[in-house]
Image (cartoon, helix red, strand yellow):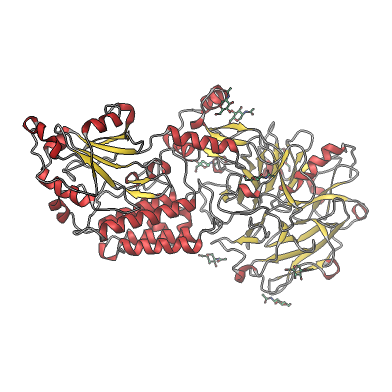
Amino acid sequence: MSSGYLQFPLFLLLIHSILNLSSGFGSMGPISAAFGKNRFFCAIDASGKQEVICWGKNNSISSTNSALFGDIPAMFALTGGNGFMCGILANTSTVYCWELLGSNNDVLVPDIYRNTAYTHVAAGKSHVCAIRGSYFSDNDWGTIDCWEIVARSNSSLSSLPSSLYYDESITNLVFRKVVSGDGFSCGEVREGGLVCWGPEATTLGVSGVSEVFVSLASGMESVCGISGASGEVKCWGENQSFIGSPVGIRFVSLAAGAKHFCGIREDNHGIECWGHFNISAVPKGSGFMAIASSDVTTCGIREDDLVLDCWFVDVTSAPDYDPPLQLCSPGLCTLSSCAEGTFAFNASTLSETDLTSLCVRKDLKICSPCGSNCSEGFFLSSPCSENADRVCTGCSLCQNSSCWDVCKLQSTPASHKKHEQDLQRFVLIVGSSALGLLLLLISWCLLPCMKGSRKEEGTKKSLASCIGKVESEKHINADPFPPLSVTPCIGTAQVFRLSELKDATNGFKEFNELGRGSYGFVYKAVLADGRQVAVKRANAATIIHTNSRDFEMELEVLCNLRHGNIVNLLGYCSEMGERLLVYEYMPHGTLHDHLHGGLSPLNWSRRLKITMQAAKGLEFLHMEPVPPIVHRDVKTSNILLDSDWVARIADFGLLGPNERELSGDIRTDVYSFGIVLLEILSGRKACDRDYMPPSIVEWAVPLIRHGKAAATIDRNVALPKNVEPLLKLADIAELTLRENPSERPCMSDVATWLEQILKEGLIL
Ligand SMILES: *[C@@H]1O[C@H](CO)[C@@H](O)[C@H](O)[C@H]1NC(C)=O
Ligand SMILES: *[C@@H]1O[C@H](CO)[C@@H](O)[C@H](O)[C@H]1NC(C)=O
Ligand SMILES: *[C@@H]1O[C@H](CO)[C@@H](O)[C@H](O)[C@H]1NC(C)=O
Ligand SMILES: *[C@@H]1O[C@H](CO)[C@@H](O)[C@H](O)[C@H]1NC(C)=O
Ligand SMILES: *[C@@H]1O[C@H](CO)[C@@H](O)[C@H](O)[C@H]1NC(C)=O
Ligand SMILES: *[C@@H]1O[C@H](CO)[C@@H](O)[C@H](O)[C@H]1NC(C)=O
Ligand SMILES: *[C@@H]1O[C@H](CO)[C@@H](O)[C@H](O)[C@H]1NC(C)=O
Ligand SMILES: *[C@@H]1O[C@H](CO)[C@@H](O)[C@H](O)[C@H]1NC(C)=O
């Protein structure tokens, strides 16, 4: 036992507000793990009700599935022991413990302690120690109660009061935090310093330790703490468990596995692990708010979206944890105000929810430590404030010298993939900020708005171009291409003058170009009346290969098609041998560029709407025209987004009628649409050589068929609280991707199902 006098009030206030973040075996936090054969994880969810989500080895099991865990009441904090978990109840501040298959409904707290309120609890291998006091009181110092958890003959657990964890040296001490391992507990005492007790306590070699620790975590036979003075890690006990512990790095949180430790860095909230651990398993790129370790697994709550992520001591070991996709609470709810160096987590910044607080009581808040730096590939665009963590922005948005250095330094010969990921997640808003929004807006304006799509040469020969019309008769003699016999689309499409479109595109100047395809260029044009339109201008090769009679008929079809989910033809022009088609302008560009090309990432509600709208557009093309229009090139770059972010199918129906008849089954479009669904769901490209297998279909369909659809969901955007709609989306994709075309649904079915999903599940 020892004493020290490091009790500067401000210092302690800071410590107080972050001491509860660490968790793992034997310490307390918003996420915790039960060790051993019956291991499982639990976390407090972000519903604002502080409900507990638990998941086991094989599959995700939420608290709503009471078969494996019983009905777990709302909790303030969690701590895991060997095969059991304890928590402090949100309504009474008493302790409640449960186990996997907790059918016997025993709260695993001896009768004499059941009605006692506790501020802190720590489960060890087979004992629990807790500090008396109300969770709501400002005073979190209290005396300690400990009890044992023992296995009955039928191997279910029960609790009994214990003298093993009492000795005279501790009964009179007042503690503030406690951790428990295998046969020992350690705590911080008011007199200052760390004290350990229990039958195995002496083997740790903790004595004369007078420091203050902001966080403690204990493994089976070891304990580590974050020094309040240096922010660095100090460890005691069996030394293989903490071999290679980091030096010179400040931490804010720790978690202990059986033979390894992991910590959250203070600067960028990244993860470091040491002990019996393969370093290449550490997650990179994302910051974390809380972590917990089981024997060989560590799970954490990511700071950008509060989604769970798990990793294993050895990258080669088969993942045995598949965490649920619910959003989790990033910290513990406390009554005290947030100290310097911390910020109050603002629940309303979570996308897809309308929460105002993550805590059951409105007077409670979550104080989390501020970050001061960003992970590689991101620069710090705004510092931490009282109400929001620092904001990290992707280096792709670095525009001046303020971030040049950090981004330049970090642009190592990183793989193309890495760069793309950065682009996709280019604004990592930890706590949404005006700056983040501004950056989003800027990026939309700077990037190209519409891309012409490339068609395979030969698949579509008669393409966008223009048709001669009556006014151009004076050019006929000079025109090598015969004029059209009739003026198509009278009353539905506007006939434009060439000079008009020339002016509107600044003489078809490069800077107005949106893209090019085998048919020619696509230009953005502003008409004299101010309307923005997209103009497709056929190149010479296209015109020479186009039979104007076929083209006329095609134009007649296109002009009469009108639907809110296709890019509608507004008019055309045919003069001087030119063929120009004038389309509605789509200011938000292609779906492809939002998913893969660095335009703003789309959230789930928008993505789901886009799937439904695109399906309706295709359904229309399949159902309305006679004969039906088979698109034959359904892909994300042919799905455009209009000014209201509504999806529109582009680049259809430019086949000659004969080709249309030959083009076969409309269910080839259904298959292609399935690929689009997978791209929307996963954020992956249809074919990506950075993955094995590169084909999205070969990768995703087996996962979906094996009930692992959750693994295909894009983790680079914040997930909705309810992921059910996304799992259904995966199921629909699977159906559309059946090898046998007759097993594929038709677009009408797909559109109806997607509409249903939107109606049912989505939490905005
Ligand atoms: C996990 O899977 C294994 C084999 O698939 C099975 O034996 C075991 O009972 C499962 N455990 C749980 C908790 O479902
Ligand atoms: C607190 O919650 C527990 C578990 O839901 C319940 O059994 C108990 O009756 C509640 N106590 C009070 C005072 O509401
Ligand atoms: C184990 O035995 C106890 C009584 O000794 C009983 O209360 C409990 O329900 C039993 N558990 C199981 C899982 O059979
Ligand atoms: C680890 O502990 C063993 C004894 O338990 C000791 O012999 C060894 O020197 C220690 N290693 C280090 C690196 O401290
Ligand atoms: C860590 O994992 C990597 C990748 O599987 C492997 O190449 C390396 O040998 C492992 N290192 C250790 C120390 O196990
Ligand atoms: C929380 O975020 C919302 C939305 O971003 C904002 O309107 C509100 O002012 C924030 N609250 C605090 C206390 O900063
Ligand atoms: C911030 O992190 C980057 C690496 O991500 C590192 O190069 C840089 O030195 C850090 N800056 C500070 C001030 O710690
Ligand atoms: C750099 O650009 C950011 C916005 O992108 C702006 O907030 C900041 O003031 C600029 N800094 C300098 C030195 O121009």
- Residue at image coords 14%, 52%: 657
Numbered marks: total: 0
Residue 614's x, y, as percent? Answer: 36, 53
- Residue at image coords 62%, 33%: 382
Quarter of the image with the N terminus is top right
Residue 742's x, y, as percent? Answer: 26, 65
- For residue 425, above or below residue 168: above
Is there any visible trace of residue 259 in the rendered image?
no
Q: Nearer the viewer, residue 204 or 433?
A: 433
| Left or right of 426, for residue 573 | left
Is there any visible trace of residue 208 in the rendered image?
yes
Q: Quadrant of residue 63?
A: bottom right
Q: Nearer the viewer, residue 421 or 480?
A: 480
- Locate ligand 2 by image quadrant: bottom right
| Left or right of 157, for residue 381 | left
| Left or right of 666, for residue 3 | right
The residue lying furthest to the left in this view is: 477
Residue 238's x, y, as percent? Answer: 72, 45
Q: Quadrant of residue 275?
A: top right
- Residue at image coords 30%, 59%: 619
